[in-house]
């Protein structure tokens, strides 16, 4: 085997499950399809985690604005709660 062939084999994509490694090219077609499904699912999870981070950041900003507004209303003589009649 020459150096080029050896490097090609070393760079071949592998899948690690537990403590075992599998060459992707040696997997069955059904197993490769499951690898693709896992990759797509991982990408979707990452996208959803980004969306969650955006929503949590927005929630924090809205809460901060609300607290500031309530504090401003109380300082300005506004009522924090309705008083019973």
Image (cartoon, helix red, strand yellow):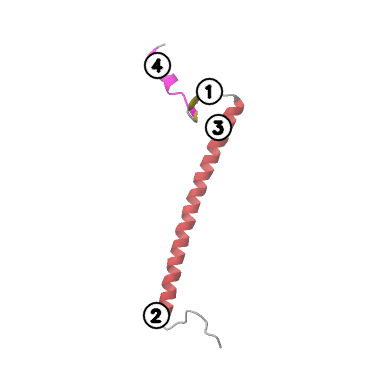
Q: Nearer the viewer, mark 4 or mark 1?
A: 1
Q: Pick whichever of labels 4 and 1 is earlier in the sequence.
A: 4
User: Which residue lies at the image location 46% right of the left edge and 23% below the top edge?
Assistant: 12
Residue 67 included in the magenta stretch of the image: no
Residue highlighted by disc 4: 4
Residue 6 included in the magenta stretch of the image: yes
Residue highlighted by disc 1: 25
Q: Quadrant of residue 27?
A: top right
Q: Pick whichever of labels 1 and 2 is earlier in the sequence.
A: 1
Secondary element type, mark 1: helix
CA–CA distance in space, label 3 to label 4: 27 Å
Residue at the bottom extreme of this rendering = 85
Q: Pick whichever of labels 3 and 4 is earlier in the sequence.
A: 4
Dot 3 and dot 2 residues touching (CB under 8 Å): no
Q: Residues within 10 Å of mark 3 (few under 14, many from 20)?
A: some
The segment highlighted magenta reads 2-15
Q: Is residue 44 above or below residue 25?
A: below
Q: Residues within 10 Å of mark 1 (few under 14, many from 20)?
A: few
Residue highlighted by disc 2: 75
The location of residue 68, given as percent across then percent down, is 41, 71
User: Which residue lies at the image location 43% right of the left edge and 68% below the top edge?
Assistant: 65
Residue at the front extreme of this rendering = 19
The location of residue 43, given as percent across then percent down, is 51, 41
Secondary element type, mark 4: helix
CA–CA distance in space, label 1 to label 2: 70 Å
CA–CA distance in space, label 1 to label 3: 12 Å
User: Which residue lies at the image location 54% right of the left edge and 21% below the top edge?
Assistant: 26
Q: Nearer the viewer, mark 3 or mark 4?
A: 3
Task: Identify the mark at residue 35; answer none if there is no mark.
Answer: 3
CA–CA distance in space, label 2 to label 4: 76 Å
Residue at the top extreme of this rendering = 1
């Amino acid at each position: 085997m020459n150096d080029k062939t050896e490097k090609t084999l070393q760079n071949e994509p592998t899948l690690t499950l537990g403590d075992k490694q599998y060459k992707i090219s040696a997997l069955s077609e059904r197993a490769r399809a499951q690898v693709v499904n896992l990759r797509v699912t991982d990408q979707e999870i990452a996208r959803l985690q980004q969306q969650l981070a955006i929503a949590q950041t927005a929630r924090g900003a809205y809460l901060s604005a609300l607290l500031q507004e309530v504090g401003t209303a109380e300082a300005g003589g506004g009522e924090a709660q309705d008083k019973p009649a």
